[in-house]
Image (cartoon, rainbow, N blue to C red):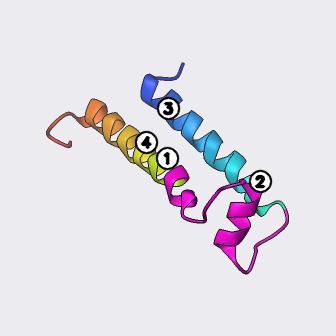
Amino acid sequence: MLTMTGLLSEINTLFIEITRDRIFKTGYPDDFLAHVKKCLKLKSAQDWNYIFAPGDIVEDTSETISNFLRFGTSGR
């Protein structure tokens, strides 16, 4: 049975995998941001940051919560 942080981590990982599969299904492009913009139908290449920054935050936060629940405030 998954914990809430485990579930959140699984959802985030799935989102990242699906997005990467869509981007790299035709190989590795020379102009990555232009390719991402086209594949994900973004308005701007900068939108890439708005998509993945929250995912990184969710991943880091989930790991932090899991470690806090496991080790408490002592870190041991």
- Residue toward you, 23 or 33: 33
Labels 4 & 3 near each other (Cβ < 8 A): yes
Residue 55: image tag? 1
Labels 4 & 1 near each other (Cβ < 8 A): yes
Q: Secondary structure at mark 3?
A: helix
C-alpha gap between disc 4 and disc 2:
21 Å
Q: Secondary structure at mark 1?
A: helix
Residue with the mark numbered 2:
22
Label whose residue precedes the other's in the sequence (4 or 3): 3
Q: In which quadrant will I find the C terminus?
A: top left
User: For mark 4, does the 10 Å Cα neighbourhood hold few (<14), some (14 to 19), or many (20 or more) residues?
Assistant: some
User: For mark 2, does the 10 Å Cα neighbourhood hold few (<14), some (14 to 19), or many (20 or more) residues?
Assistant: few
Q: Is residue 17 left or right of residue 69?
A: right
Residue with the mark numbered 4:
58
Q: Position of residue 54 (x, y in %)?
A: 45, 47
- Give the residue at the far right of this rendering: 26
Q: Secondary structure at mark 4?
A: helix
Looking at the rendered structure, the kind of residue marked 1 is Gly
**Which residue is located at x 51 percent, y 59 percent?**
49
Residue with the mark numbered 3:
8
Q: Is residue 13 above or below residue 2?
A: below
**Which residue is located at x 46 percent, y 23 percent?**
3
